[in-house]
Structure formats: structure tokens, C-alpha cells
Amino acid sequence: MELSDFSFDNEEEQKIRFSSSISYSFYRALRDIEDYSICFENFLKELNLLYENKIKIAKFQPIERQLEVYFKQLEFGNIAATIKLNYLDFDNSTHDMYESMLVINYGIDQSFLPELIDEISAVLANLN
């Protein structure tokens, strides 16, 4: 998973726009996402707590749930990662709703967390 092309607005409740690229095996999905900065701030807090073994799950869930990321602490510093990319479309002519979801589950160790925490901190630092 790669998040890129971050941009910010100057409204009272700041929004962050970014692109997500998720590749796994022969799948590749791209989405442009916009959400409030508070979602990133909450995710950053949870990642720090997860790294300190104070909570079991850190999650990133933008309000519209286009992308969901979950990191669940397992034994011996291992982490179960789940990435969900959701797509919802509404056909105005037929009034049909189409929904699809790509879910990727994999295991990693917690050694990647400090780098991820630093990267999210850098994104949030650009808000100011």
C-alpha cells in the first residue's frame, strides 16, 4: 500500500486529499481520497499506542470508508494487517447501487511501525 500526492485545504476543519495505491499479487487498485486531518491524527495516536503495547488494534477509517487499514497486535511483536479498499457507485438512470471491496490480509512484524509513525507525522507537520 502506498499513500501519495498529499494536499491540504485551508478551511477551519482541515481536510487532507491523497491517492492510495494498493497492490497485491496481480491486483492493483487506485483511489483518490479526501478526509479530515483528525482521522490521521487519531491513527497516529493509535499507532504510537500499538507500538508501546498499550492497545491491541490501530485503525485508519476515513469518514466515507473508501479505505480502511487495521493493524492488530499478535504475540511476539507480530502484527496482522488488513487493508480494505471499498468502492460504491450509484447509477442515476437505473437507480442501481454497485458495491465492491478488495480485502488484503497479511502478517508483518512491528519493526515497520516507527517508520510509518514518522511518515504520518511528517504529513501532519505539513498542515501547519
Image (cartoon, rainbow, N blue to C red):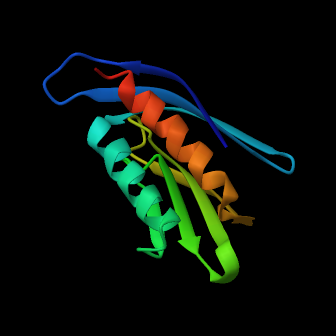
Near-viewer residue (53 or 66): 53
Residue at the far right in the pictured view: 26
Residue at the far bottom in the pictured view: 75
Near-viewer residue (29 or 72): 72
At 58% from the left edge and 49% from the top edge, which residue is drawn? 114
Give the percent coordinates (x, y) of residue 36: 28, 36
Near-viewer residue (110 or 41): 110
Locate residue 86 relative to residue 21 in the image: left or right.
left
In the rendered image of this protein, does residue 30 appear above or below residue 74? above
In the rendered image of this protein, does residue 123 appear above or below residue 116? above
Locate residue 57 relative to residue 15 in the image: left or right.
right
Indicate the quadrant where residue 8 lies: top left
Give the percent coordinates (x, y) of residue 75: 65, 83
Residue at the far left in the pictured view: 12
In the rendered image of this protein, does residue 109 appear above or below residue 98? below
Q: Quadrant of the N terminus?
A: top right
Indicate the quadrant where residue 95 lies: top left
Q: Quadrant of the C terminus?
A: top left
State whether residue 63 appears in this view.
no
At 86% from the left edge and 47% from the top edge, which residue is drawn? 26
Give the percent coordinates (x, y) of residue 116: 57, 45
Locate residue 80 relative to residue 119 in the image: left or right.
right
